[in-house]
Amino acid sequence: MVSDPQLLLLSASVAKILGFSREFCSSEHFLRCMAGNELLPGSKPYATRYGGHQFGHWAGQLGDGRAINLGESGKASVDTQNLQLKGAGPTPYSRGADGRAVLRSSVREFLCSEAMHFLGIPSTRALSLVTTGDSVLRDMFYDGNAAEEPGAIVCRVAPSFTRFGHFQLCAMKGELQLLQQLMDFTIASDFPDLHARHKAGEIDRQNLYIAWFAQICQITLTMLLGWMRTGFVHGVLNTDNMSILGLTIDYGPYGWLDHFDPSWTPNTTDATMHRYAFGRQPEIVQWNLYQLANALLPVIGDKEALEKELVRFATHYEQMWRDMMLAKIGLEPLSVEEDDALIAGLMQILTERETDMTIFFRRLAGYEHRRNDITLADIVEDALYDVQAFDALQRQSVNNWASAYSQRLESQAPDKDARKLRMDALNPCFLLRNYLTQEAIERMAEGDFSMLHELHEALQKPYEENPRFARFYKKRPDWARHKAGCSMLSCSS
Protein backbone atom coordinates (compact mmCIF):
# COMPACT_ATOMS: atom_id res chain seq x y z
CA MET A 1 0.00 0.00 0.00
CA VAL A 2 1.16 3.53 -0.76
CA SER A 3 0.00 6.48 1.30
CA ASP A 4 -1.02 9.17 -1.19
CA PRO A 5 -1.15 8.09 -4.85
CA GLN A 6 -1.47 10.80 -7.48
CA LEU A 7 -1.75 10.29 -11.25
CA LEU A 8 1.05 12.25 -12.93
CA LEU A 9 0.93 10.98 -16.52
CA LEU A 10 -1.45 8.87 -18.59
CA SER A 11 -1.03 7.54 -22.12
CA ALA A 12 -4.37 7.97 -23.84
CA SER A 13 -3.28 5.80 -26.78
CA VAL A 14 -2.35 2.88 -24.50
CA ALA A 15 -5.62 3.24 -22.58
CA LYS A 16 -7.46 3.01 -25.90
CA ILE A 17 -5.63 -0.20 -26.82
CA LEU A 18 -6.65 -1.69 -23.49
CA GLY A 19 -10.26 -0.60 -23.92
CA PHE A 20 -10.10 1.65 -20.85
CA SER A 21 -12.52 4.56 -21.05
CA ARG A 22 -11.63 8.13 -20.18
CA GLU A 23 -14.05 7.94 -17.27
CA PHE A 24 -12.42 4.81 -15.88
CA CYS A 25 -8.93 6.31 -16.19
CA SER A 26 -10.16 9.36 -14.27
CA SER A 27 -11.63 7.29 -11.47
CA GLU A 28 -10.29 6.74 -7.97
CA HIS A 29 -10.47 3.00 -8.56
CA PHE A 30 -8.12 3.25 -11.55
CA LEU A 31 -5.70 5.39 -9.52
CA ARG A 32 -5.66 2.91 -6.65
CA CYS A 33 -5.12 0.02 -9.07
CA MET A 34 -2.21 1.77 -10.76
CA ALA A 35 -0.72 2.43 -7.32
CA GLY A 36 -0.99 -1.22 -6.34
CA ASN A 37 -3.51 -0.48 -3.59
CA GLU A 38 -6.40 -2.32 -5.29
CA LEU A 39 -6.83 -4.95 -7.98
CA LEU A 40 -8.38 -4.56 -11.39
CA PRO A 41 -11.46 -6.78 -11.91
CA GLY A 42 -10.33 -10.33 -12.60
CA SER A 43 -6.69 -9.55 -11.86
CA LYS A 44 -4.49 -12.29 -10.41
CA PRO A 45 -1.10 -10.67 -9.83
CA TYR A 46 2.08 -12.70 -10.18
CA ALA A 47 5.81 -12.19 -10.46
CA THR A 48 8.25 -14.29 -12.46
CA ARG A 49 11.85 -15.31 -11.99
CA TYR A 50 14.67 -14.98 -14.48
CA GLY A 51 18.45 -14.91 -14.59
CA GLY A 52 20.93 -13.39 -16.97
CA HIS A 53 24.40 -12.35 -17.99
CA GLN A 54 25.34 -8.95 -16.64
CA PHE A 55 28.32 -7.26 -18.34
CA GLY A 56 29.26 -10.59 -19.89
CA HIS A 57 29.17 -12.70 -16.71
CA TRP A 58 26.49 -15.08 -15.51
CA ALA A 59 24.78 -13.42 -12.54
CA GLY A 60 22.39 -16.18 -11.49
CA GLN A 61 18.80 -15.50 -10.52
CA LEU A 62 17.95 -11.81 -10.79
CA GLY A 63 14.24 -11.09 -10.65
CA ASP A 64 11.63 -10.06 -11.03
CA GLY A 65 12.04 -8.21 -7.77
CA ARG A 66 9.81 -5.19 -8.24
CA ALA A 67 7.67 -5.88 -11.29
CA ILE A 68 4.23 -7.33 -10.64
CA ASN A 69 2.10 -8.61 -13.53
CA LEU A 70 -1.55 -7.71 -13.06
CA GLY A 71 -2.85 -9.86 -15.91
CA GLU A 72 -4.04 -9.44 -19.49
CA SER A 73 -6.41 -6.91 -20.95
CA GLY A 74 -7.56 -5.89 -24.39
CA LYS A 75 -10.56 -5.29 -26.60
CA ALA A 76 -9.95 -8.42 -28.66
CA SER A 77 -7.60 -11.38 -28.71
CA VAL A 78 -5.28 -9.68 -31.22
CA ASP A 79 -4.95 -6.70 -28.87
CA THR A 80 -4.24 -8.69 -25.72
CA GLN A 81 -1.70 -6.89 -23.57
CA ASN A 82 -0.09 -7.61 -20.23
CA LEU A 83 -0.12 -4.93 -17.53
CA GLN A 84 2.80 -4.78 -15.14
CA LEU A 85 3.44 -2.45 -12.20
CA LYS A 86 7.06 -1.48 -11.67
CA GLY A 87 7.87 -0.17 -8.22
CA ALA A 88 4.72 -1.28 -6.38
CA GLY A 89 6.59 -3.26 -3.74
CA PRO A 90 8.56 -6.45 -3.13
CA THR A 91 7.83 -9.77 -4.84
CA PRO A 92 9.00 -13.27 -3.87
CA TYR A 93 12.11 -12.58 -5.96
CA SER A 94 13.09 -9.24 -4.40
CA ARG A 95 16.13 -10.71 -2.60
CA GLY A 96 15.61 -8.43 0.38
CA ALA A 97 15.13 -5.21 -1.60
CA ASP A 98 12.16 -2.88 -1.13
CA GLY A 99 10.63 -3.39 -4.58
CA ARG A 100 10.10 0.34 -4.99
CA ALA A 101 11.19 2.88 -7.61
CA VAL A 102 12.05 6.56 -7.42
CA LEU A 103 10.28 9.32 -9.34
CA ARG A 104 13.27 10.40 -11.48
CA SER A 105 13.76 6.91 -12.98
CA SER A 106 10.01 6.35 -13.32
CA VAL A 107 9.60 9.59 -15.28
CA ARG A 108 12.43 8.51 -17.55
CA GLU A 109 10.88 5.07 -18.09
CA PHE A 110 7.41 6.41 -18.87
CA LEU A 111 8.60 9.09 -21.28
CA CYS A 112 11.17 6.97 -23.06
CA SER A 113 8.98 3.93 -23.63
CA GLU A 114 6.36 6.19 -25.19
CA ALA A 115 8.98 8.15 -27.17
CA MET A 116 10.36 4.92 -28.63
CA HIS A 117 6.90 3.82 -29.72
CA PHE A 118 6.22 7.06 -31.58
CA LEU A 119 9.66 6.90 -33.19
CA GLY A 120 8.55 3.56 -34.64
CA ILE A 121 10.95 1.46 -32.55
CA PRO A 122 9.53 -1.70 -30.92
CA SER A 123 9.13 -1.08 -27.20
CA THR A 124 7.14 -1.80 -24.12
CA ARG A 125 4.58 0.93 -23.53
CA ALA A 126 3.56 2.91 -20.45
CA LEU A 127 -0.04 3.40 -19.37
CA SER A 128 0.39 5.47 -16.24
CA LEU A 129 2.85 7.15 -13.92
CA VAL A 130 1.70 7.47 -10.32
CA THR A 131 3.50 9.19 -7.47
CA THR A 132 3.14 7.34 -4.18
CA GLY A 133 3.46 10.03 -1.53
CA ASP A 134 6.17 7.90 0.09
CA SER A 135 9.94 8.26 0.13
CA VAL A 136 12.44 5.72 -1.18
CA LEU A 137 16.03 5.47 0.02
CA ARG A 138 18.52 5.31 -2.86
CA ASP A 139 22.27 5.81 -3.34
CA MET A 140 22.14 7.50 -6.75
CA PHE A 141 25.89 7.49 -7.39
CA TYR A 142 26.78 4.36 -5.37
CA ASP A 143 29.15 6.48 -3.31
CA GLY A 144 27.73 5.83 0.14
CA ASN A 145 25.54 8.94 0.18
CA ALA A 146 22.06 7.44 0.13
CA ALA A 147 19.15 9.88 0.30
CA GLU A 148 15.38 9.82 0.48
CA GLU A 149 13.66 10.44 -2.87
CA PRO A 150 10.00 10.61 -3.94
CA GLY A 151 8.59 7.23 -4.92
CA ALA A 152 6.61 6.40 -8.04
CA ILE A 153 5.07 3.49 -9.95
CA VAL A 154 4.89 2.94 -13.70
CA CYS A 155 2.32 0.67 -15.28
CA ARG A 156 4.11 -0.96 -18.19
CA VAL A 157 2.20 -2.62 -21.02
CA ALA A 158 3.36 -5.22 -23.55
CA PRO A 159 2.04 -8.37 -25.23
CA SER A 160 4.60 -10.25 -23.13
CA PHE A 161 7.32 -9.45 -20.63
CA THR A 162 9.19 -12.72 -21.21
CA ARG A 163 12.95 -12.20 -21.39
CA PHE A 164 15.94 -14.19 -22.60
CA GLY A 165 16.78 -14.64 -18.94
CA HIS A 166 13.63 -16.65 -18.24
CA PHE A 167 14.89 -19.43 -20.53
CA GLN A 168 18.47 -19.06 -19.35
CA LEU A 169 17.60 -19.64 -15.72
CA CYS A 170 15.71 -22.86 -16.50
CA ALA A 171 18.65 -24.13 -18.55
CA MET A 172 21.25 -23.15 -15.97
CA LYS A 173 19.29 -24.95 -13.26
CA GLY A 174 18.91 -28.05 -15.41
CA GLU A 175 15.11 -27.71 -15.41
CA LEU A 176 14.77 -29.01 -18.95
CA GLN A 177 11.15 -30.12 -18.68
CA LEU A 178 10.19 -26.68 -17.37
CA LEU A 179 12.30 -25.10 -20.11
CA GLN A 180 10.40 -26.98 -22.81
CA GLN A 181 7.08 -26.09 -21.20
CA LEU A 182 8.08 -22.42 -21.20
CA MET A 183 9.13 -22.63 -24.86
CA ASP A 184 5.83 -24.27 -25.85
CA PHE A 185 3.80 -21.77 -23.84
CA THR A 186 5.68 -18.79 -25.31
CA ILE A 187 5.21 -20.00 -28.88
CA ALA A 188 1.50 -20.65 -28.33
CA SER A 189 0.92 -17.31 -26.60
CA ASP A 190 3.24 -14.91 -28.40
CA PHE A 191 3.96 -16.51 -31.79
CA PRO A 192 0.48 -17.66 -32.89
CA ASP A 193 1.36 -18.03 -36.58
CA LEU A 194 4.12 -20.50 -35.80
CA HIS A 195 1.91 -22.31 -33.32
CA ALA A 196 -0.86 -22.62 -35.93
CA ARG A 197 1.55 -24.10 -38.48
CA HIS A 198 2.66 -26.69 -35.93
CA LYS A 199 -0.91 -27.57 -34.96
CA ALA A 200 -1.79 -27.97 -38.65
CA GLY A 201 1.07 -30.43 -39.09
CA GLU A 202 3.02 -28.17 -41.46
CA ILE A 203 6.11 -28.16 -39.22
CA ASP A 204 7.45 -30.71 -36.72
CA ARG A 205 8.45 -29.79 -33.18
CA GLN A 206 12.19 -29.45 -33.72
CA ASN A 207 11.77 -27.31 -36.83
CA LEU A 208 9.14 -25.32 -34.96
CA TYR A 209 11.73 -24.39 -32.33
CA ILE A 210 14.33 -23.51 -34.97
CA ALA A 211 11.83 -21.34 -36.88
CA TRP A 212 10.91 -19.69 -33.59
CA PHE A 213 14.53 -18.84 -32.82
CA ALA A 214 14.94 -17.49 -36.36
CA GLN A 215 11.94 -15.23 -35.81
CA ILE A 216 13.36 -14.01 -32.50
CA CYS A 217 16.58 -13.09 -34.32
CA GLN A 218 14.63 -11.21 -36.99
CA ILE A 219 12.45 -9.14 -34.65
CA THR A 220 15.45 -8.39 -32.44
CA LEU A 221 17.24 -7.14 -35.56
CA THR A 222 14.33 -4.80 -36.33
CA MET A 223 14.60 -3.32 -32.83
CA LEU A 224 18.38 -2.93 -33.11
CA LEU A 225 18.14 -1.11 -36.45
CA GLY A 226 15.70 1.34 -34.86
CA TRP A 227 18.24 2.07 -32.15
CA MET A 228 21.05 2.63 -34.63
CA ARG A 229 18.90 4.77 -36.93
CA THR A 230 18.06 7.26 -34.19
CA GLY A 231 21.25 7.09 -32.12
CA PHE A 232 19.67 5.33 -29.14
CA VAL A 233 21.90 3.64 -26.57
CA HIS A 234 20.21 1.21 -24.20
CA GLY A 235 22.99 1.33 -21.66
CA VAL A 236 22.35 -2.02 -19.92
CA LEU A 237 22.22 -4.70 -22.61
CA ASN A 238 22.36 -7.61 -20.19
CA THR A 239 20.59 -10.77 -21.35
CA ASP A 240 17.91 -10.25 -18.71
CA ASN A 241 17.05 -6.95 -20.43
CA MET A 242 16.33 -8.62 -23.78
CA SER A 243 12.68 -9.21 -24.71
CA ILE A 244 11.68 -12.42 -26.47
CA LEU A 245 9.41 -10.24 -28.64
CA GLY A 246 12.15 -7.88 -29.78
CA LEU A 247 10.87 -5.02 -27.63
CA THR A 248 13.06 -2.40 -26.01
CA ILE A 249 12.62 -3.07 -22.30
CA ASP A 250 13.94 -1.70 -19.00
CA TYR A 251 14.80 1.96 -19.42
CA GLY A 252 17.59 2.62 -16.96
CA PRO A 253 20.75 4.56 -17.92
CA TYR A 254 19.75 5.02 -21.55
CA GLY A 255 20.39 7.96 -23.83
CA TRP A 256 20.43 9.20 -27.40
CA LEU A 257 23.64 10.42 -28.95
CA ASP A 258 24.01 14.16 -28.87
CA HIS A 259 27.25 14.39 -30.82
CA PHE A 260 27.97 11.34 -32.94
CA ASP A 261 30.31 9.09 -30.97
CA PRO A 262 30.23 5.30 -31.47
CA SER A 263 32.14 4.81 -28.18
CA TRP A 264 29.61 6.68 -26.01
CA THR A 265 27.75 4.92 -23.22
CA PRO A 266 25.24 6.60 -20.89
CA ASN A 267 25.91 4.10 -18.08
CA THR A 268 28.27 5.19 -15.29
CA THR A 269 28.85 1.52 -14.42
CA ASP A 270 30.11 1.00 -17.98
CA ALA A 271 32.32 4.11 -18.06
CA THR A 272 35.60 2.17 -18.25
CA MET A 273 34.62 -0.91 -20.31
CA HIS A 274 32.24 0.75 -22.79
CA ARG A 275 30.76 -2.72 -23.33
CA TYR A 276 27.35 -1.27 -24.10
CA ALA A 277 28.47 1.74 -26.12
CA PHE A 278 26.45 2.82 -29.15
CA GLY A 279 28.76 1.28 -31.74
CA ARG A 280 29.02 -2.04 -29.89
CA GLN A 281 25.29 -2.67 -29.65
CA PRO A 282 25.11 -4.90 -32.77
CA GLU A 283 27.93 -7.09 -31.43
CA ILE A 284 26.38 -7.30 -27.95
CA VAL A 285 22.88 -8.06 -29.21
CA GLN A 286 24.27 -10.94 -31.26
CA TRP A 287 26.22 -12.14 -28.20
CA ASN A 288 23.00 -12.11 -26.21
CA LEU A 289 21.29 -14.14 -28.94
CA TYR A 290 24.12 -16.66 -28.64
CA GLN A 291 23.38 -16.98 -24.94
CA LEU A 292 19.71 -17.57 -25.68
CA ALA A 293 20.66 -20.22 -28.25
CA ASN A 294 22.86 -21.92 -25.64
CA ALA A 295 19.90 -21.99 -23.25
CA LEU A 296 17.54 -23.47 -25.85
CA LEU A 297 20.03 -26.00 -27.23
CA PRO A 298 19.30 -28.81 -24.70
CA VAL A 299 15.70 -28.91 -25.95
CA ILE A 300 16.31 -28.14 -29.63
CA GLY A 301 19.38 -30.34 -29.95
CA ASP A 302 20.52 -28.94 -33.31
CA LYS A 303 23.55 -26.73 -32.69
CA GLU A 304 24.28 -26.30 -36.39
CA ALA A 305 20.81 -24.92 -37.15
CA LEU A 306 21.03 -22.38 -34.31
CA GLU A 307 24.50 -21.26 -35.38
CA LYS A 308 23.22 -20.81 -38.93
CA GLU A 309 20.57 -18.38 -37.68
CA LEU A 310 23.13 -16.46 -35.66
CA VAL A 311 25.38 -16.06 -38.70
CA ARG A 312 22.35 -15.01 -40.73
CA PHE A 313 21.58 -12.36 -38.09
CA ALA A 314 25.03 -10.79 -38.52
CA THR A 315 24.82 -10.90 -42.32
CA HIS A 316 21.34 -9.41 -42.40
CA TYR A 317 22.34 -6.70 -39.97
CA GLU A 318 25.26 -5.61 -42.14
CA GLN A 319 23.04 -5.46 -45.23
CA MET A 320 20.13 -3.73 -43.52
CA TRP A 321 22.32 -1.23 -41.66
CA ARG A 322 23.92 -0.20 -44.95
CA ASP A 323 20.51 0.24 -46.58
CA MET A 324 19.25 2.15 -43.55
CA MET A 325 22.19 4.55 -43.58
CA LEU A 326 21.68 5.19 -47.28
CA ALA A 327 17.99 5.86 -46.68
CA LYS A 328 18.90 8.34 -43.94
CA ILE A 329 20.79 10.38 -46.54
CA GLY A 330 18.13 9.94 -49.22
CA LEU A 331 19.83 7.36 -51.41
CA GLU A 332 19.21 3.85 -52.69
CA PRO A 333 21.77 1.01 -52.77
CA LEU A 334 24.16 1.03 -55.71
CA SER A 335 27.03 -1.36 -54.98
CA VAL A 336 28.49 -2.62 -51.72
CA GLU A 337 31.88 -1.07 -52.44
CA GLU A 338 30.57 2.37 -53.41
CA ASP A 339 27.94 2.43 -50.69
CA ASP A 340 30.43 1.44 -47.98
CA ALA A 341 32.90 4.07 -49.15
CA LEU A 342 30.26 6.81 -49.08
CA ILE A 343 29.02 5.81 -45.62
CA ALA A 344 32.56 5.52 -44.23
CA GLY A 345 33.32 9.00 -45.49
CA LEU A 346 30.26 10.33 -43.74
CA MET A 347 31.18 8.59 -40.48
CA GLN A 348 34.60 10.23 -40.64
CA ILE A 349 33.04 13.68 -41.05
CA LEU A 350 30.65 13.13 -38.14
CA THR A 351 33.35 11.89 -35.76
CA GLU A 352 36.18 14.25 -36.72
CA ARG A 353 34.45 17.07 -34.85
CA GLU A 354 31.61 16.83 -32.30
CA THR A 355 28.65 16.86 -34.67
CA ASP A 356 25.09 16.66 -33.41
CA MET A 357 23.69 13.54 -35.08
CA THR A 358 20.01 14.48 -34.99
CA ILE A 359 20.46 18.04 -36.24
CA PHE A 360 22.88 17.02 -38.98
CA PHE A 361 20.61 14.42 -40.57
CA ARG A 362 17.56 16.64 -40.25
CA ARG A 363 19.36 19.55 -41.91
CA LEU A 364 20.81 17.29 -44.59
CA ALA A 365 17.28 16.66 -45.88
CA GLY A 366 17.20 20.29 -47.03
CA TYR A 367 20.54 20.15 -48.84
CA GLU A 368 20.35 21.34 -52.45
CA HIS A 369 23.26 19.89 -54.33
CA ARG A 370 22.84 22.27 -57.27
CA ARG A 371 23.28 25.41 -55.14
CA ASN A 372 26.63 26.96 -54.31
CA ASP A 373 25.59 29.56 -51.72
CA ILE A 374 24.86 26.95 -49.01
CA THR A 375 27.41 24.15 -49.01
CA LEU A 376 27.35 20.87 -47.15
CA ALA A 377 30.14 22.22 -44.95
CA ASP A 378 27.77 25.00 -43.85
CA ILE A 379 25.20 22.40 -42.82
CA VAL A 380 27.76 20.38 -40.87
CA GLU A 381 29.06 23.50 -39.13
CA ASP A 382 25.53 24.30 -37.94
CA ALA A 383 25.52 20.95 -36.11
CA LEU A 384 28.97 21.31 -34.51
CA TYR A 385 29.29 21.67 -30.74
CA ASP A 386 32.59 23.44 -31.18
CA VAL A 387 31.47 26.59 -32.99
CA GLN A 388 34.92 27.18 -34.48
CA ALA A 389 34.64 27.00 -38.27
CA PHE A 390 36.30 24.29 -40.32
CA ASP A 391 39.90 24.89 -41.27
CA ALA A 392 40.85 24.59 -44.93
CA LEU A 393 41.67 20.87 -44.78
CA GLN A 394 38.48 19.97 -42.93
CA ARG A 395 36.35 22.00 -45.31
CA GLN A 396 38.03 20.34 -48.27
CA SER A 397 37.33 16.91 -46.76
CA VAL A 398 33.65 17.75 -46.38
CA ASN A 399 33.45 19.21 -49.86
CA ASN A 400 35.07 16.10 -51.35
CA TRP A 401 32.43 13.93 -49.72
CA ALA A 402 29.73 16.39 -50.83
CA SER A 403 30.88 16.01 -54.41
CA ALA A 404 30.45 12.23 -54.33
CA TYR A 405 27.15 12.59 -52.50
CA SER A 406 25.86 15.18 -54.97
CA GLN A 407 26.60 12.86 -57.90
CA ARG A 408 24.51 10.16 -56.26
CA LEU A 409 21.70 12.61 -55.59
CA GLU A 410 21.70 13.74 -59.20
CA SER A 411 21.31 10.20 -60.48
CA GLN A 412 19.03 8.77 -57.76
CA ALA A 413 17.11 11.56 -56.04
CA PRO A 414 17.18 14.83 -57.98
CA ASP A 415 13.76 15.94 -56.66
CA LYS A 416 14.70 17.71 -53.42
CA ASP A 417 11.16 17.95 -52.06
CA ALA A 418 10.39 14.26 -52.51
CA ARG A 419 13.76 13.34 -51.05
CA LYS A 420 13.20 15.58 -48.04
CA LEU A 421 9.86 13.92 -47.28
CA ARG A 422 11.49 10.50 -47.30
CA MET A 423 14.43 11.60 -45.17
CA ASP A 424 12.26 13.48 -42.65
CA ALA A 425 10.26 10.30 -42.13
CA LEU A 426 13.43 8.53 -40.98
CA ASN A 427 15.34 11.32 -39.24
CA PRO A 428 13.44 12.75 -36.26
CA CYS A 429 13.60 16.41 -35.32
CA PHE A 430 12.69 15.61 -31.71
CA LEU A 431 14.46 13.15 -29.45
CA LEU A 432 13.98 12.84 -25.72
CA ARG A 433 17.49 14.03 -24.96
CA ASN A 434 18.69 13.34 -21.43
CA TYR A 435 19.17 17.01 -20.61
CA LEU A 436 15.53 17.75 -21.45
CA THR A 437 14.23 15.02 -19.17
CA GLN A 438 16.60 16.08 -16.41
CA GLU A 439 15.46 19.69 -16.69
CA ALA A 440 11.83 18.56 -16.43
CA ILE A 441 12.65 16.45 -13.35
CA GLU A 442 14.36 19.38 -11.66
CA ARG A 443 11.40 21.65 -12.39
CA MET A 444 9.08 19.04 -10.91
CA ALA A 445 11.03 19.18 -7.66
CA GLU A 446 10.05 22.87 -7.52
CA GLY A 447 6.39 22.10 -8.21
CA ASP A 448 6.46 22.98 -11.93
CA PHE A 449 5.11 20.11 -14.07
CA SER A 450 4.64 22.09 -17.29
CA MET A 451 7.79 20.89 -19.04
CA LEU A 452 6.98 17.26 -18.21
CA HIS A 453 3.66 17.55 -20.01
CA GLU A 454 5.21 19.45 -22.91
CA LEU A 455 7.75 16.68 -23.42
CA HIS A 456 4.98 14.10 -23.27
CA GLU A 457 3.13 15.96 -26.01
CA ALA A 458 6.21 16.63 -28.17
CA LEU A 459 7.39 13.03 -28.18
CA GLN A 460 4.14 11.86 -29.78
CA LYS A 461 5.06 13.51 -33.12
CA PRO A 462 8.85 13.29 -33.28
CA TYR A 463 9.12 13.66 -37.06
CA GLU A 464 6.97 16.79 -37.33
CA GLU A 465 8.43 20.21 -36.61
CA ASN A 466 6.18 22.15 -34.26
CA PRO A 467 7.01 25.82 -33.55
CA ARG A 468 5.71 25.36 -30.00
CA PHE A 469 8.54 22.94 -29.29
CA ALA A 470 11.32 24.63 -31.27
CA ARG A 471 13.42 24.99 -28.11
CA PHE A 472 13.53 21.16 -27.87
CA TYR A 473 15.13 20.79 -31.32
CA LYS A 474 18.46 22.23 -30.27
CA LYS A 475 21.93 20.95 -29.44
CA ARG A 476 22.73 19.89 -25.90
CA PRO A 477 23.71 23.03 -23.96
CA ASP A 478 27.20 23.30 -22.49
CA TRP A 479 25.90 23.13 -18.92
CA ALA A 480 24.59 19.60 -19.61
CA ARG A 481 27.83 18.16 -21.00
CA HIS A 482 28.96 16.55 -17.74
CA LYS A 483 25.97 17.06 -15.47
CA ALA A 484 24.50 13.98 -13.75
CA GLY A 485 21.31 12.90 -15.43
CA CYS A 486 22.29 14.69 -18.65
CA SER A 487 25.52 13.06 -19.78
CA MET A 488 25.55 9.75 -17.92
CA LEU A 489 23.29 7.96 -15.45
CA SER A 490 23.59 5.20 -12.91
CA CYS A 491 21.42 2.11 -12.60
CA SER A 492 20.12 3.37 -9.24
CA SER A 493 16.34 3.65 -9.39
Image (tube, rainbow, N blue to C red):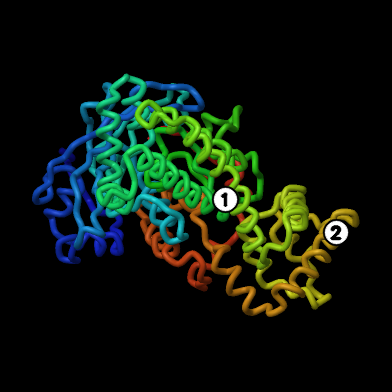
| Quadrant into which the C terminus falls | top left
Which kind of residue does numbered mark 2 sit on?
Arg
Q: Position of residue 337 (x, y in %)?
A: 77, 54
61 displayed left or right of 72: right
User: Does residue 445 show up?
Assistant: no
Q: Which label is found at residue 228?
A: 1
| Residue 210 image-quadrant placement | top left
In the foreground, 240 or 336: 336
Q: Which label is found at residue 363?
A: none
Q: Residue at x 46, y 46 (%)?
A: 220
Q: Which label is found at residue 395?
A: 2
In the foreground, 402 or 362: 402
CA separation, marks 2 and 1?
A: 27 Å
Q: Position of residue 479 (x, y in %)?
A: 60, 47
Helix, strand or loop status at disc 2? helix
Other-residue count near label 2 (Cα within 10 Å), few / some / many at <14 / 14–19 / ≥20: some
Helix, strand or loop status at disc 1? helix
Other-residue count near label 1 (Cα within 10 Å), few / some / many at <14 / 14–19 / ≥20: some
Q: Position of residue 268 (x, y in %)?
A: 53, 32
Q: Residue furthest front?
A: 201
442 displayed left or right of 203: right
Are circles 2 and 1 on residues that touch, CB within 8 Å? Answer: no
Q: Nearer the viewer, mark 2 or mark 1?
A: 1
Which kind of residue does numbered mark 1 sit on?
Met
| Quadrant into which the N terminus falls | top left
Q: Residue at x 42, y 39 (%)?
A: 242
Q: Residue at x 51, y 53 (%)?
A: 226
Q: Position of residue 433 (x, y in %)?
A: 52, 52
Q: Earlier in the sequence, mark 2 or mark 1?
A: 1
In the foreground, 269 or 445: 269
